[in-house]
Amino acid sequence: MRRATAAEKAGRLNHARQVLSRLERLSEAVERMVQDCDASRRQAYRYLQHARGLTAPVAVSDAKVAFTVKLSRSLVQRLRRYASSSDLTLSEIVSRAVVVLLDRERGRV
């Protein structure tokens, strides 16, 4: 069985919040999650347990795809140093930088 994507997990957590608000018994909520999400009972229970602690719906992000680029060795080293000091992933750093660049360029058009 394949792992759920981040977007699928967020959707299932949001669904679990809704199920919990409609059903009083946990066993009924588990059965509903199993049916609706094609999840095992164990996984449905985990989603429901996690959803109980949420105070707001989880944001569903765009699905991520691999995108290969070539960068200079020194730039990659700088990125890796920055990633380790900032506790961000390389993907997150590059994504943020590209968004800033694209937003800046949109203002010029």
Image (cartoon, rainbow, N blue to C red):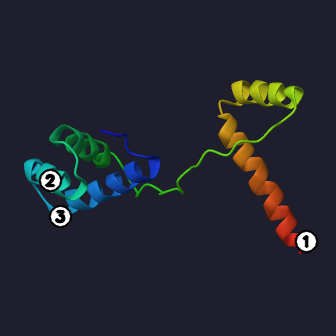
The image quadrant where one finds the C terminus is bottom right
Check disc 2 and give the amino acid type: Ala
Residue at (22%, 47%) from the top-left corner? 39
From what the image shows, is residue 83 above or below residue 109?
above
Where does the image place residue 107, in percent across and percent down from the top left? Answer: 86, 71
- Discs 1/2, front: 1
Residue at (26%, 62%) from the top-left corner? 18
**Badge 3 is on which residue?**
22
Proximity of marks 3 and 2: CB atoms separated by less than 8 Å: no
Is 17 displayed left or right of 95 in the figure? left
Residue at (25%, 42%) from the top-left corner? 49
- Discs 1/3, front: 1
**Badge 2 is on which residue?**
29
Q: Of the two numbered discs 1 and 3 on the same chain, state the one appearing first in sequence.
A: 3
Q: Which mark is residue 108?
A: 1
Where does the image place residue 94, in percent across and percent down from the top left? Answer: 74, 43
Farthest residue toward the right?
108
Is 58 displayed left or right of 49 in the figure? right
Where does the image place residue 34, in percent across and percent down from the top left? Answer: 17, 51
Decide which of 17, 60 is in the foreground and name it. 60
Is 30 displayed left or right of 73 in the figure? left
Q: Of the two numbered discs 1 and 2 on the same chain, state the one appearing first in sequence.
A: 2
The image quadrant where one finds the N terminus is top left
